Image (cartoon, rainbow, N blue to C red):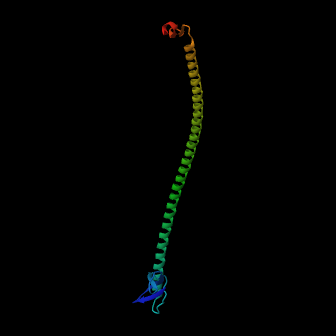
Amino acid sequence: MTPIKSNSDIKIISIEIVPLEIEWNEPVLLILFAEHEQTENYFSNAHSSGEEVSLTKDRRIKKLEQELAAAHADALLIAQEQEIFTEELQSAHEEVVSSNEELQTVNEELETSKEEIESANEELTTTNQELQTRNDLLNEAYDYSEAVFATIHEPMLVLDKNLRVKSAKDPLLVL
């Protein structure tokens, strides 16, 4: 930092020199100037009175107290915001945990339903195989009875339980 005196005011500035890394024929530097408020009286004037120094210190103390109060208020605000965000995060976490538990329950129910469907499918497959076997046996019995019926040369009547004619074979009618 370099103090500069202009007229009767003392100003404090800082100079920062940053080398820039860009392709150029010569090195390029960035020079930043920043003005700072005077924190102390760096130069004591021979003609300064104790009263001026006291007033300057009082103003500086008052300003620092205001800055401290503002920083304190900002810190409280940030703490309150952080507490609110923490509560929201906790709430969101609880919702996620609850949703996860619900999804786990639904997943278990789906597993159970899947097992039940697989079991019912196996039962249907077994029942279909039994029905197909019975159908095949019934067709064989029908074909056998038709073959027997066709080979008999005697007159024959087949009646149902109400004594109605289901089929008839009369050699005289065939001739």
Q: Position of residue 88 (x, y in %)?
A: 51, 55
Task: Give me the residue at 47% from left, 87% from top.
Answer: 2
Residue 44 sits above or below residue 77 on the image: below
Q: Residue 150's spot in the image, x, y percent? A: 55, 14
Which of these two is toward me, 87 or 111? 111
Q: Is residue 19 above or below residue 95?
A: below
Please tell me which residue is depicted at 52% across the width and 53% down the height of the picture: 92
Which residue shows up at 55% across the image and 16% down it?
A: 146
Q: Quadrant of residue 137?
A: top right
**Along the line of sight, the residue nearer the viewer: 120 or 127:** 127
Residue lying furthest front:
175
Image x and y of residue 12, in percent: 45, 84
Along the line of sight, the residue nearer the viewer: 83 or 98:
98
* Residue 148 x, y percent position in the rendering: 58, 15
Please say whether residue 170 is visible from this viewpoint.
Answer: no
Q: Is residue 57 above or below residue 115?
A: below
* Residue at the outermost left position: 7
**Is residue 78 at least partly visible in the picture?**
yes
Q: Nearer the viewer, residue 68 or 165?
A: 165
Quarter where residue 29 is shown: bottom left
Total marks placed: 0
- State which quadrant residue 113 falls in: top right
